[in-house]
Amino acid sequence: MPRGFVGLPAMVQERPVRVERRLSAILAADVVGYSRLMHSDEEATHAKLTALLTEAVQPAIAEHSGRIVKTTGDGFLAEFPSAVEAVRAAVYFQTRIHELTIGDVEDRRIVFRVGINIGDVIAEPHDIFGDDVNIAVRLESIAEPGGICISSSGYNHVRGKVGVEFVDMGEQNLKNIARPVRAYAVVRERRSPATYVQSERPRLSIVVLPFANLSGDPAQEYFVDGVTESLTTDLSRIRGSFVIGRHTAFTYKGQPVNIKQVGRELRVRYVLEGSVQRSGDRLRVNVQLVDPETSAHLWADRFDKPIADLFEMQDEIVSRLANQLEAKLTEEEARRAERSPLPASMEFYFQGRALFNKGWTPEYLAQARLSFERALAVDPKNIDAMVWMPTVDLIVAANLLSDNRAALLADAEAALAKVLSVEPNHAWAHLSLGSVLIRTNRIAQGMAECERALALDHNLAEAQIQIGWAKLLMGRPADTQAHVDEAFRLSPRDVFTYRWLMLVGMAKLHLNEDAEAVDWLFRSVEANRNHPASHFLLAAALALLGSLDQASAAVKAGLAVNPSFTVRRFRYAAQGDNPTHLAARERLLEGMRMAGVPEG
């Protein structure tokens, strides 16, 4: 050191902490219905799960060069250096678990779901992090019980290398993942560890075969293919559905098709086929839904109208078909569930939806709610049952089937807010919450929720109805019918059209157009005699016109469906504080009294 230099402590520059990253195949797995199993028998479930992890899972992962990063009570996260090894390990341990549990009672059997993704992760000694890890976890949540779901990035690495087949599930909107992820399901057969699988077709599984162009004009091919692709996308929005991706479906284009063979190859419960024909200035679309096991035609429809803007027509065709198919498929799945000795959670859910669609009587709604409760007892994570149970409470309150209206609405709001905190893009949850807000005099907020529901699912005709109802409460009954007309455009044969007809009738009463109101309300009653509100509104309209005998008969019919309805209950359930609406409401109440509705 030079003389005269005064030494100072060395200034050491802090280096940034190095984050270790690596490309990995991530496997996420959990036990289906774990909470239910633990509730039934904690010690036995814990012992069985420990044994399966020791005898099946851990050896399979170790043998295929993987490591269990962490366990989560009801599942685990594993990491592999290769997607091929991850899939082979998953196939092997799923097979082994099936072999070890085949003698167990169905509702006590431990079954895993598996999700696999490949991507760049942040690695720590005892954990891994990153979006690609989250994708694997979300893929696990959409896998069938006993199944394996893999992302397209993983599929591209393993295709043709692992000795199993895959079904294209199309693009999936995964919770808290910004972009849709294309997913594939392993086709499973119960043969050997190399080709494990369940022969049963997934619930509500469907393929939309490429529609046939019968116009004889190759230039129309783009329109026909557009209908097929859009319908495939829209059907994938049906909750609980498994829709074969359009890329797989289009491999059948232009070929003679054997429906039974398609069902076997793709392992789907339903096949939708159709044709489009342009003749002069008209367009005709024919569709039919087929059961590939029996070749039975379950449903058919025809769409025939003058040609306008082709792209607008495509949207209208797809919306109508998607809405009709959702109702039909829900009904078919409910029938299958009735024949099942041990219904699974989604089977109970479909039973509840079918009962809900039958009519809003106290009996049907109570049965529907019980089905949703059973669905949650089997699988507490069934998000759809979590949405529809408070939706039933909302309907009971909104239709004046209980004096406990305020509490039911408050409970429904809390339950729906909880669902949306974990599933923010659930369209029907936004719609139901919007309906609760409208019915508790927060109309602007409620309309915003309904608009959000429409943004998530443009086919959701019921959202238009709720917005139309909100306009009525705001003292704008003349604006209501436009929203009802749009709902009919989207779903002209909807199971709830009787309510839509009633809403127009109510708007006409608010406009003092009583004769027109009677026409609409008669149509509502004819469409569904199990909807009590339509009877009482018809009674009021008839009484205001002076037809007291007919009004009395309408009251009698309404009380047969809902014996507890009273003028007092209708007044107590007032919604909105707009003076125009409140004045019209007082006029309705007077009509009900004149018709003989009990005061209460």
Image (tube, rainbow, N blue to C red):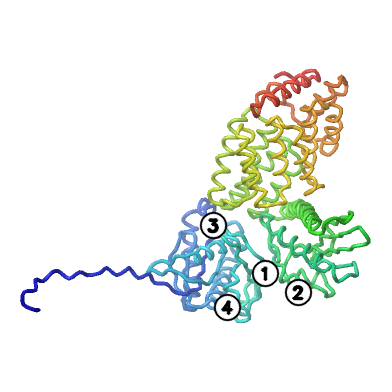
Amino acid on which disc 2 is placed: Thr
User: Circle 4 sits on which residue?
Assistant: 157
- Quadrant containing the N terminus is bottom left
Q: Which residue is mark 3?
A: 176
x and y percentages locating residue 132 in the rendered image: 51, 67
**Dot 4 or dot 1, earlier in sequence:** 4
Q: Earlier in the sequence, mark 3 or mark 4?
A: 4
The local crowd at label 2, few if under 14, some if 14 to 19, many if 20 or more residues have their Cα within 10 Å, is few
Q: Nearer the viewer, mark 1 or mark 3?
A: 3
CA gap between label 3 and label 4 equals 25 Å
What is the CA distance from the residue labelled 1 to the residue labelled 3?
22 Å
Q: Is there a contact, CB below 8 Å, between mark 1 and mark 2?
A: no
Question: Does residue 217 appear in the picture of this structure?
Answer: yes
Residue 553 position, x and y percent, is 85, 24
Q: Secondary structure at mark 3?
A: loop
Marks 3 and 2 in Cβ contact (< 8 Å): no
- The residue at which mark 2 appears reads as 251
Q: Looking at the image, do the residues carrying marks 3 and 4 touch, with CB atoms under 8 Å apart? A: no
Left or right: where 50 falls relative to 236: left
Q: Quadrant of residue 482?
A: top right
Asked whether, in this view, residue 158 is left or right of residue 6, the answer is right
Q: Quarter of the image for the C terminus: give it.
A: top right
Badge 1 marks a residue whose secondary structure is strand
Q: Which mark is residue 168?
A: 1
Camera-side residue: 321 or 10?
Answer: 10
State the residue in front, 18 or 561.
18
Q: Label 4 sits on what residue type?
A: His
At label 3, the amino acid type is Asn
Q: Position of residue 517 (x, y in %)?
A: 83, 30
